[in-house]
Amino acid sequence: MDELTAILSQFELISVVDIALVTLIFYGILRLFAGTQGVQLLRGVLVIILVGALAANFSGLTAFTWLIRSGGVAILIALPVIFQPELRRALERLGRTGRLFSRSRDTTMASILISELVSTCSRLSLLRAGAIIVLEDQTGMREIIETGVRVDSLINTELFLTIFHPGTPLHDGAVIIQNDRIVAASCVLPLTQRSLSDTSLGTRHRAAIGITEDTDALALVVSEETGSISAARNGRLARRLDERRLRRVLESFYESRGQFLDIQGPEKEAEESE
């Protein structure tokens, strides 16, 4: 009891701040790796570090202790290579500060865009026409746009139906939207490398998750097999959306961009895949 009292007596405000900062760092790392393949790699690295530390402190083996301590430098060098995708994603998120200084756009225009997109997805769903529509946010998508065909048109339901009509040259790929314009069609998106629990998810859904893992975009998907509508953002997929829930997702997206619409808070998507 006396030892515990002595330890507590050494605690100062700076010690609390120090512990809080370390806790936040570990929490941020865990949030960063959550739901990715990096989780297993991180666990393996932590196990190696823990076993090595215990062995070095309690084994009394001088040569082994030297090996563990020397290997720590190699691990530090290897970590940026092993976790490159996760680290890149973290740096991109830290760099997304432009929205703090962006001016609010006309909410009437945002409402029109939302109505057009909801109408488009609903009609594509009825037609069982597979589609993927990506709405750019703060992260630029120039490299993705260059993989497709330039369109540069106002958002229009009839144009979407033409692009995604089965058999047309541009239907097999993603449409990219910047602000209030369709800038490109038939774009190639990166596929997520995560192992998804639902094996029924096809290439379009994997592409929607993949592009939202790398950027802050919102991706809308219409399934060719079932006609169901899904939305992906931040690597998470909400499935089987009706018109009301889809509208809420879009309103939340434009609200986060500083294009606030006079709505109640967006509903949380109940169904998410890994």
Image (spheres, helix red, strand yellow):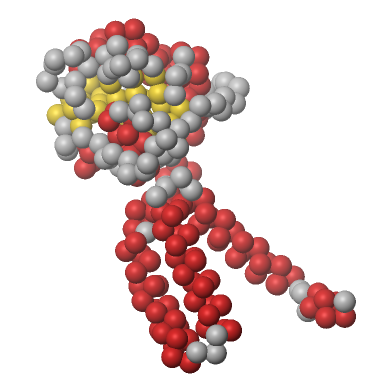
Q: In x, y percent, where is residue 168?
A: 13, 16
Q: Residue at x 39, y 50 (%)?
A: 37
Q: Is residue 148 left or right of residue 237?
A: left
Q: Is residue 258 in sight in this rendering?
A: no
Q: Residue at x 46, y 18 (%)?
A: 241
> Residue 25 falls in which quadrant of the image?
bottom right
Q: Nearest the camera: 274 or 12?
A: 274
Q: In x, y percent, where is residue 167?
A: 14, 15
Tally of numbered tags: 0
- Is residue 13 positioned above or below 137 on the image? below
- Is residue 21 positioned above or below 34 on the image? below
Q: Nearest the camera: 257 or 197?
A: 197
Q: Residue at x 53, y 71 (%)?
A: 50
- Is residue 88 positioned above or below 213 on the image? below
Viewport quadrant of the C terminus: top left
Q: Is residue 264 left or right of residue 251?
A: right
| Residue farthest right in this picture | 2
Q: Nearest the camera: 12 or 104?
A: 12
Viewport quadrant of the N terminus: bottom right
> Residue 209 falls in which quadrant of the image?
top left
Q: Residue at x 35, y 15 (%)?
A: 226
Q: In x, y percent, where is residue 136?
A: 34, 34
Q: Is residue 218 left or right of residue 171?
A: right
- Is residue 254 positioned above or below 190 on the image? above
